Amino acid sequence: MSAPTSDRCPAYSAFFGVMGATAAMVFSALGAAYGTAKSGCGISAMAVMKPEFIMKSVIPVVMAGIIAIYGLVVAVLIAGGIEKDGYSLYKSFHHLGAGLSVGLSGLAAGFAIGIVGDAGVRGTAQQPRLYVGMILILIFAEVLGLYGLIVSLILTTRPGNSVC
């Protein structure tokens, strides 16, 4: 016996989809902002000693900005999938999970990029051979956000039970 239509597609189901889009954008932007600010502080401190390394040291800031793009992409996909009629709880929970996945992994990646970027550019000013190691660690930190993006895309594009 199937559930009645109102049980599968209640009026409040869109709330969970909207919260998924919000979580995707807010948490990934928080991670990107922290990574940018923390790395920027390191770049400023490093530029006092070695101003010629400024452009070389902007990479952590760029990588932190990419985290926000991941959240933006998922938020747009979720927002495009929210329907006024026929939006099931099943689909809305997928959208909430997708938003939380990219958002929270973006937050974690942004924190990692900020901390590594700050210490890495300061260390590179004292020992230029640290630069390659810093870039490798930054790549591993960025991949954390990419994992969340992949899971979010799978959850967002999964065909939902939209029959109401």
Image (cartoon, rainbow, N blue to C red):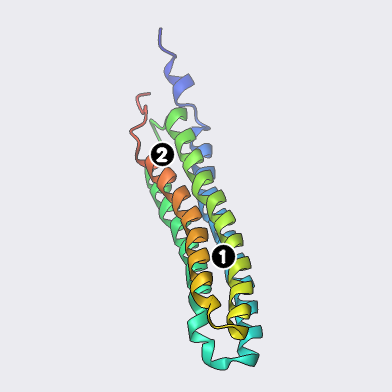
Q: Residue 26: x percent and y percent?
A: 56, 55
**Vertical comparison of 89 with 145: above or below:** above
Quarter holding the N terminus? top left
For the residues labelled 1 and 2, say whether their Cβ atoms are less than 8 Å apart: no
Q: Is residue 130 above or below residue 25?
A: below
Residue at (57% x, 61% y) in the render: 110
Q: Amino acid at mark 1?
A: Ile
Residue 105 percent coordinates (x, y):
54, 51
Q: Closer to us: mark 1 or mark 2?
A: 1
Residue highlighted by disc 1 = 113
Q: Is residue 62 left or right of residue 111?
A: left
Q: Which residue is mark 2?
A: 155
Please tell me which residue lies in front, 84 or 161. Answer: 161
Residue at position x 49%, y 49% in the image: 102
51 relative to 94 in the view: left or right: right
Residue 146: which disc?
none
Q: Position of residue 99 (x, y in %)?
A: 50, 46
Residue shown at 51%/45% (left/top)? Answer: 101
Amino acid at circle 2? Leu
